[in-house]
Image (cartoon, rainbow, N blue to C red):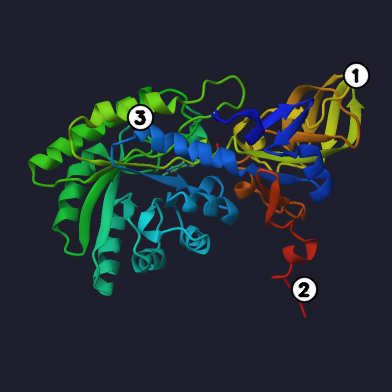
Amino acid sequence: MSTLGNESGIARRNGQLWVEGVSAQSLAQTWGTPAYVYSRAMIEAAYQSFVDALGSRPHLVCYAMKANSNLGVLSVLARLGAGFDIVSGGELQRVVAAGGDPSRIVFSGVGKTAVEMRDALAAGIRCFNVESPSELERLAHVASHMGVVAPVSLRINPDVDAGTHPYISTGLRENKFGIGMQDALDVYRRAAALDSIAVHGIDCHIGSQLTSVEPYKDALRILVDLIDTLASEGIELAHIDVGGGQGIRYDDEQPLDIGAWADVINEAIGERDMEVLVEPGRFIAGPAGVLLTRVEYLKENEGRHFAIVDAAMNDLIRPALYSAWQRIESVVDQQRPSHEYDVVGPVCESADFLGKARELAIAEGDFLAIRDAGAYAFVMASNYNTRPRGVELLVDGKDVHVVRERESVESLFELESPLP
Ligand code: LLP
């Protein structure tokens, strides 16, 4: 995915894996495992690919920080002038803590509380992506109470099939997301009539890990029709937020071509004078991360080989939750006999696997890397089985920044108490 040369991304050189100028082996030895390691240069390059593709069209790239909300990662993007797509008051606080600009925040999500709305209005965010008529009324109420006007766009559910895993598909009528086309006009009219609401734009997000531009094309056609109908009623929209969902290569998929994707957007919008907002998460953070883990035991059961590693489903739940496939490789090439291994963790669940039937030449004590673990990895980690979450490292050239320390076991129960 990255346009970076080998030296500045995550790549194999001379028989081992490197994260920019640091070998993955030395990272694992120095900081221990499990360790999530991110490449600053890859995050920057992926962000830049959106900026370059959108070119002269006014735009704002709002990183969907749910993919990876580590303050170190956010600060890299904040320094580039990125916007942020948030889905909670907690994410708002993270942006501020990382030095991000609240006026570049869009707030998505179906369940915004009144408190979250108030905090976001007080921070002066760019726009609320409103997902239901009730949410609109609540926001109007909160804003009017504060004596301010809330900027909104409506998230439209265009009922298109994103052709992705059902758990990460969001643009179909049966999903909980957005406002259906049959209600969209009425909700816009209502929004335009409310004193404490300013209608700024339109929004949609149809799903995640899309590797074709066709679903974007389908959704935009529907949105642009609505934009024109609204304009004929005197409701002029200033921006169109096309959501995130740009797919990456985990296995042999073709990652979404951001140039072709931008062409689709420009074609759909045509001469209309509109700013484009985009909310990529995975595309920016995914390929820029690896999860390093250590082989604790090799074991054979009835002819099946297992590699039991020190990372588990609590550290990376995507394989268990979505049957997701992520590349697993030795950190250092070894001349050993190879077998097909199920790579599993120590958690007491049969779903605790990171990969199945992987050809690996490994011995106990070796380190493995799970690739493309920059997105939806640490952020979805849990402490199941009282397992402290791993350290997070951000590599910048030859420098290694500990952007989150490994958790201590004590910290996992410090909010608890036994009965007196
Ligand atoms: N905007 C909205 C409103 C979203 O709900 C999402 C993701 C994004 C943007 C960013 O989507 P992305 O560019 O990352 O595809 N945990 C799942 C993915 C869940 C995506 C949720 N929404 C996974 O690990 O595959």
SS for dot 3 = helix
Q: Quadrant of the C terminus?
A: bottom right
Please provide percent x and percent y for residue 227.
18, 38
Numbered badge on residue 262 = 3
User: Disc 3 residue type?
Assistant: Ala
In which quadrant of the rendered view does residue 119 lie?
bottom left
Q: Which label is found at residue 337?
A: 1
Looking at the image, which residue sits at the far bottom? 420
Of the two numbered discs 3 and 1 in the rendering, the one whose residue sits closer to the viewer: 3
Left or right: residue 251 compared with residue 220:
right
Q: Nearer the viewer, residue 251 or 398?
A: 398
Q: Is the C-beta of the residue carrying label 2 under 8 Å from the nearest atom of ligand 1?
A: no
Give coordinates of residue 250: x percent, y percent: 60, 27
Whether the residues at callouts 3 and 1 have beta carbons within 8 Å, the answer is: no
Circle 2: element type: loop
Asked if disc 3 and disc 2 are in contact, CB closer than 8 Å, the reply is no
- Where in the figure is residue 219, as x and y percent of width and height? 31, 30
Mark 3 and mark 2: span between their CA atoms?
56 Å
Tell me whether circle 1 and circle 2 mark residues in contact (CB < 8 Å). no
Measured as percent of width and height from the top left, residue 143 is found at 27, 67
Which quadrant holds residue 262? top left
- In the rendered image, the quadrant that contains the N terminus is top right
User: Which residue is rendered at x = 68% and y = 30% of the image?
Assistant: 11
The residue that mark 2 highlights is: 418
In the image, 205 versus 373, the foreground residue is 373
